Image (tube, rainbow, N blue to C red):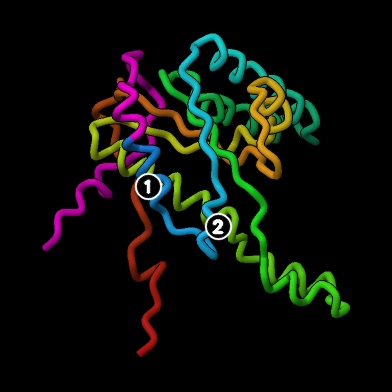
């Protein structure tokens, strides 16, 4: 049986040592990310690597502010408290020595380009877009990055929650590439939580259907 430990050993870590990651190792993770499949091979991703601790701290501040602003709009105190409990997860990237900000470009959908001048309905547009091919590509790239990090002995955490502050984060970073927007953050570093257990997964019979 093939050794798939690099998959089973991956887990989301939110406590990190502050040791820097050598550029060679970072480049290996990023190159692994670029080997992911993407619809029509558009490779619609871009990775901004941040190692500056002051900038990472500022990123945490803007995410925290946005999070609190949203919490203040909750209809009940119970709803607000539940949302505020998520804050430490949304800002866990600030505990790591490296934050990778993942950008994605809009997917150029050939089907839509063919149909757009034929009186296509909004319902049909939503149907075409429902598979979210752009996000599938970004997710595949991030997963490759996480698995490469695990194989190289590093911990990681994939965060999409901070995207509620995407405009503020993009402005703070100052990165601009036409058509690209923030999609996720990835925290990378050596683990400071070596005994953390991965949460259980649903059994196969709950998530798999065979059709003979």
Q: Nearer the viewer, residue 117 or 75?
A: 117
The x, y position of residue 31, in whole percent, is: 37, 42
Quick check: is 9 in the magenta stretch?
A: yes
- 208 horizontally vs 75: left or right: left
Q: Quadrant of residue 24?
A: top left
Badge 2 is on which residue? Answer: 42
Report x, y in % for residue 138: 52, 49
What residue is shown at x 36% (from left), y 81% (from top)? 210
Residue at the (15%, 54%) spot, across then down: 3
Magenta segment: does it hold 206?
no
Decide if residue 181 is on the left or right side of residue 191.
right
Few, some or many residues within 10 Å of mark 1 (<14, 14–19, 20+)? many
Q: Which residues are magenta?
A: 1-27
The residue that mark 1 highlights is 144
Q: Residue at x 66, y 40 (%)?
A: 181
User: Is the residue 100 above or below the residue 16 in the image?
Assistant: below
Q: Secondary structure at mark 2?
A: loop
Q: How many marks?
A: 2
Q: With 81 as the anchor, is 201 left or right in this view?
A: left
The answer to whether residue 78 is seen in the rendering is: no
Please name the predominant secondary structure of the magenta segment in the image.
loop
Of labels 2 and 1, earlier in sequence is 2
Classify the position of the C terminus by image quarter: bottom left
Residue sitting nearer the eye, 113 or 5:
113
């Amino acid at each position: 049986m093939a050794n798939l430990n690099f998959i089973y050993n991956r887990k989301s870590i939110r406590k990190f040592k502050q040791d820097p990651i050598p550029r060679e190792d970072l480049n290996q993770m990023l190159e692994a990310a670029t080997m992911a499949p993407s619809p029509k091979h558009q490779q619609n991703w871009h990775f901004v690597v941040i190692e500056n601790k002051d900038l990472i701290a500022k990123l945490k501040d803007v995410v925290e502010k946005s999070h609190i602003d949203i919490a203040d709009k909750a209809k009940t105190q119970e709803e607000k408290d539940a949302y505020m409990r998520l804050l430490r997860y949304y800002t866990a990237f600030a505990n790591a020595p490296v934050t990778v900000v993942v950008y994605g470009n809009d997917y150029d959908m050939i089907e839509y380009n063919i149909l757009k001048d034929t009186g296509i309905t909004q319902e049909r547009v939503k149907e075409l877009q429902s598979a979210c091919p752009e996000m599938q590509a970004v997710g595949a790239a991030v997963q490759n990055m996480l698995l490469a990090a695990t194989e190289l002995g590093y911990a990681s955490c994939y965060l999409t929650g901070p995207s509620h502050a995407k405009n503020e984060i993009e402005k703070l970073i100052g990165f601009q590439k036409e058509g690209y927007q923030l999609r996720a953050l990835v925290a990378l570093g050596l683990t400071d939580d070596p005994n953390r257990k991965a949460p259980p997964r649903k059994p196969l019979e709950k998530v798999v259907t065979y059709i003979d």
